[in-house]
Image (cartoon, rainbow, N blue to C red):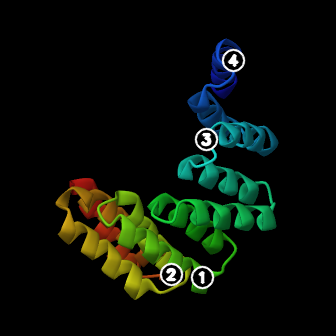
């Protein structure tokens, strides 16, 4: 019910035009509807309210990417990292953009940096595995899934789903099915 949600975000911003989270969530809502220009507009307004936010800045970079504005996306991610060098999300979002444009040699170090800053995060763990999978380094991707499950048993469901997907991508259907079944058991 994105259209209905849009009305509530508009009302929230009518009541308080400086409500940062309303811009953030409306940006997500617009992107879910495929309206990237409106999403970018919402994130640009949010960034005016909080120019130091790694989440807002990173999401703006992501919206630039999704709208096909690759150069703007890369510039935004680089600016975000310069302003927020200790925020794992800055590196994670940039790594995702780099992986989407198949610059794996740059994406992997970015994701490893995010992981080094936030190894406890499920996002950092699974996205590091994902970037390796996208780069077709299936062995490293599997090792990362195993590592995350060993480190935190609560990650076992995502670890098995991740391994299932990696084995599926590497055309090992027997192991893919095994891990998907393990995920169901979990």
Mark 4 or 3, which is nearer the eye?
Answer: 3
- At 81% from the left and 43% from the top, the residue drawn is 37
Mark 2 or 4, which is nearer the eye?
Answer: 2
Q: Residues within 10 Å of mark 1 (few under 14, many from 20)?
A: few
- Whichever of callouts 4 and 3 sits on the residue coming sooner in the sequence is 4
> Which quadrant: the C terminus?
bottom left
Where's residue 6, x and y in %? 68, 24
Give left or right: position of 133 versus 6: left
Q: What residue does disc 4 label?
A: 7
- The mark found on residue 50 in the picture is 3
- At 61% from the left and 36% from the top, the residue drawn is 24
- Whichever of callouts 3 and 2 sits on the residue coming sooner in the sequence is 3
Asked if residue 12 is positioned above or below residue 63 in the image, the reply reads: above
Mark 3 secondary-structure assignment: loop
The answer to whether residue 117 is visible is yes
- Whichever of callouts 2 and 4 sits on the residue coming sooner in the sequence is 4
Mark 3 or 2, which is nearer the eye?
Answer: 3
- At 19% from the left and 71% from the top, the residue drawn is 150
Where's residue 125, x and y in %? 36, 67
The alpha-carbon separation of the residues under discs 4 and 3 comes to 23 Å
- The mark found on residue 106 in the picture is 1
Asked if residue 69 is positioned above or below residue 55 in the image, the reply reads: below
Q: What residue does disc 2 label?
A: 109
Where's residue 2, x and y in %? 65, 28
Mark 4 secondary-structure assignment: helix
Could you tell me if the residues under marks 2 and 1 are in contact, i.e. CB atoms within 8 Å? yes
> Which quadrant: the N terminus?
top right
Q: Quadrant of residue 26?
A: top right
Q: Residues within 10 Å of mark 3 (few under 14, many from 20)?
A: few
The alpha-carbon separation of the residues under discs 3 and 2 comes to 28 Å
Give left or right: position of 110 versus 153: right
């Amino acid at each position: 019910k994105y259209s209905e949600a849009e009305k509530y975000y508009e009302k929230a911003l009518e009541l308080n035009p400086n409500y940062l989270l309303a811009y953030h969530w409306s940006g997500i809502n617009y992107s879910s509807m495929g309206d990237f220009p409106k999403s970018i507009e919402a994130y640009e307004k949010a960034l005016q309210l909080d120019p130091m936010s790694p989440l807002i800045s990173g999401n703006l970079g992501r919206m630039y990417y999704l709208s096909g504005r690759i150069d703007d996306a890369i510039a935004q991610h680089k600016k975000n990292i310069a302003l927020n060098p200790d925020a794992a999300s800055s590196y994670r979002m940039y790594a995702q953009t780099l992986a989407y444009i198949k610059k794996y040699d740059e994406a992997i170090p970015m994701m490893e940096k995010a992981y080094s800053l936030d190894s406890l995060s499920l996002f950092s763990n699974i996205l590091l595995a994902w970037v390796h999978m996208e780069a077709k380094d299936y062995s490293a991707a599997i090792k990362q899934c195993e590592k995350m499950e060993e480190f935190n048993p609560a990650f076992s469901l995502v670890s098995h789903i991740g391994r299932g997907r990696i084995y599926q991508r590497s055309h090992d259907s027997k192991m893919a099915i095994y891990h998907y079944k393990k995920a169901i058991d979990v």
